[in-house]
Image: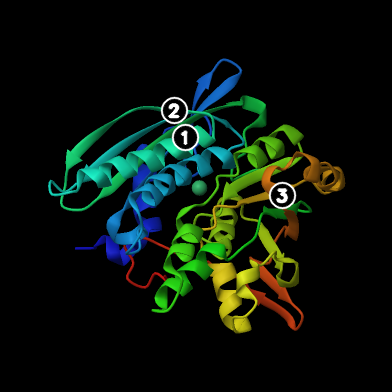
Amino acid sequence: MTRLSDIGERGAIEILSRIYDRGQPIGLGHDVGVVEWGGDYLVVTTDVVNQKTHIPAGASPTQIGWYATAVNLSDIAAAGARPLGFVAALSMPADTDVEFLRGLAQGIEECVREFGIAVLGGDTKESPVLSIAGTAFGRVRKDRILLRTGAKPGDVIVVTGDLGRAGHAAKLLEQPTALRSDALTELLRPYPRIAEGLFLSESGAVTSCMDLSDGLGVSLAQLASMTRLSYQIEFDALPLYRGLTPLPPAVAKDVALYYGGDYELLATVRADAIGSLLERWPTTAPRGQRLTVIGKVATSGGNVLITKTGKEPLLGKGWEHFRSSAIR
Ligand SMILES: [Mg+2]
């Protein structure tokens, strides 16, 4: 018997895609699935958050609710779509405090409100562990949808915000003396880059996009597996989260490249359009998020990290469910 722990999350996804694949409009393996809707796509995404793998001790129900919603809206953002609505299926033990349920719903409500949508419905079931299965809907013009495929050699690679924020928080939580509440907020309050995704989509200059739920290294490995191109990253160009500065350089590097949980957008942009995109960015981006050029796409050579001292392979390691070897 082969178990899920032998093949990992990506192995499981491969099995599922082989069974489900029958020529859907954009294919499987993107951040969202789509249904044709006149000149637009209705985009759909679902993401489960559960007590065992996602929620550190001490997290408040409101934080958990926000997080479970935000991770779904982040995929809507990655597609360059406008959110339309959200549903959530809540599984929890029968002895759950009613106040916990209230807090959870308040966190979900806070997040959907922030992005101008509402909870449209859901389900509640008894289960031995808390688990929240969220589903988000959005809408985007067919010719403006951002997918994981579409990059061409010569495109530049950009990222929103900074990298390593969530990893930094998780490292703090490992220390008994840490300010837990600050770290929990940092980890569980990702802000979906909806406005940024819309800007990138409307620019017409972006050739591919995904959100960084799993870390830069593994995300670029996923892009490369779909496009067969080489993604080359300049380490010194990476917008590292300021909290990483005091860490030993090797640890900071590992957190920034291989940790995940930042929910920033990673995109490729046509080289002839990057100048004007960056020029227009500061006036359009809300909350002062940066857009940083971090590398370029090439025809071949695998994914590469370029540092002061040379080149090294950019690894595809990062968070993966079912595998005990997962870092984190
Ligand atoms: Mg995603």
Q: Residue most toward the left?
A: 94
SS at mark 2? loop
Residue with the mark numbered 3:
288
65 vs 293: above or below: above
Label at residue 112: 1
Q: Which amino acid type is marked by label 1? A: Val
Residue 51 in percent (x, y) is at: 29, 56
Mark number, residue 256: none
Q: Which residue is mark 2?
A: 118
Quadrant, the C terminus: bottom left
Q: Give the CA distance from mark 1 to mark 3.
A: 21 Å
Residue type at mark 2: give it: Ala
Mark 3 surroundings: few (<14), some (14-19) or many (≥20) residues within 10 A: few
Amino acid at the residue labelled 3: Gly
Comes first in the chain, label 2 or label 3: 2
Q: How many C-alpha atoms fall within 10 Å of the one at disc 2: few (<14), some, or many (≥20)?
A: some
Q: Is residue 185 above or below residue 34?
A: below
In this picture, is 98 found above or below 188?
above
What whole-number distance in Å separates the C-alpha atoms at marks 2 and 3? 26 Å
